[in-house]
């Protein structure tokens, strides 16, 4: 009986570890951890006409997604996010969506503009500085990386490489 109990207990532990929803270890390399206050940042729209800061968005959740035109996960993610942007997010009035492209590897403004136009994307598009200031501030290593910042500027959720689709508010 004791042997059977030990086997069942061992199987339970193995099952728990094998299927746990443990956080991605790559998150530990990011600047901000879940529950930490995010410092103010500034990012400009792709066309350079609009500037947005985190401080201006106090009282709203902020969906901050770092992406590219060339990475397969980013391309798949943008297809899910897709041209139906308005339909998917129309009920989320208290959410500011910030999709950030940048001079990451082969991307440049012209390439991003072409990519957005060809795919008929409607989501707001922002572009990091040539020095990758925002990318650096958040410690982004893997693309795509998505941060969900709460109404008080505290990091609520993060997802490395698999984009936003696995984040609790977007399942």
Image (cartoon, helix red, strand yellow):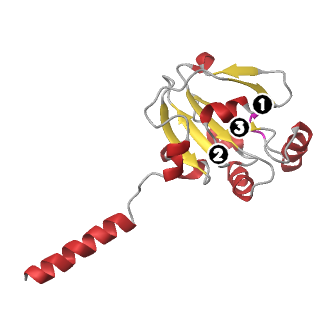
Q: Residue at x 39, y 65 (%)?
A: 19
Task: Answer with left or right where residue 119 lies relative to residue 25.
Answer: right
How many angstroms separate mark 3 from mark 1 (CA)?
A: 18 Å
Disc 1 on helix, strand or loop? Answer: loop
Q: Percent from the top left, x then y, of residue 96?
A: 63, 29
Residue 97 lies in quadrant: top right
Q: Residue at x 49, y 44 (%)?
A: 28
Residue 70 tag number: none
Task: Answer with left or right where residue 171 lies relative to residue 2.
Answer: right
Q: Which residues are magenta?
A: 122-127
Is 120 or 71 nearer to us in this picture?
71
Q: Is residue 72 above or below residue 170?
A: below
Q: Is residue 37 above or below residue 109?
A: above
Q: Percent from the top left, x then y, of residue 69?
A: 80, 49
Along the polypeptide, which appears first: circle 3 or circle 2? 3
Residue 141 tag number: 2
Q: Percent from the top left, x then y, of residue 130?
A: 82, 31
Q: Percent from the top left, x then y, of residue 79?
A: 73, 54
Please indicate, yes or no, whether residue 125 appears anywhere in the rendered image.
Answer: yes
Disc 2 on helix, strand or loop? Answer: loop
Q: Residue at x 63, y 41 (%)?
A: 140
Residue designated by label 1: 131
Disc 3 on helix, strand or loop? Answer: strand
How many angstroms separate mark 3 from mark 2 (CA)?
A: 16 Å
Residue designated by label 3: 99
């Amino acid at each position: 009986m004791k042997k059977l109990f030990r086997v069942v207990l061992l199987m339970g532990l193995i099952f728990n570890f094998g299927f746990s929803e443990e956080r991605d270890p790559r998150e530990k390399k990011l600047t901000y951890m879940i529950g930490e206050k995010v410092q103010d940042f500034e990012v400009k729209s792709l066309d350079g006409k609009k500037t947005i800061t985190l401080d201006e968005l106090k009282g709203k959740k902020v969906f901050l997604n770092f992406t590219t035109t060339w990475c397969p996960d980013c391309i798949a993610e943008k297809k899910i996010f897709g041209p139906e942007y308005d339909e998917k997010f129309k009920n989320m009035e208290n959410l500011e969506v910030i999709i950030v492209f940048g001079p990451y590897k082969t991307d440049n403004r012209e390439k991003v503009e072409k990519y957005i136009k060809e795919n008929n994307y409607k989501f707001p598009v922002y572009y990091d500085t040539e020095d990758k200031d925002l990318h650096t501030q958040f410690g982004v290593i893997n693309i795509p990386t998505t941060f969900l910042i709460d109404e008080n500027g505290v990091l609520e959720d993060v997802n490395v490489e698999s984009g936003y689709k696995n984040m609790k508010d977007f399942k």
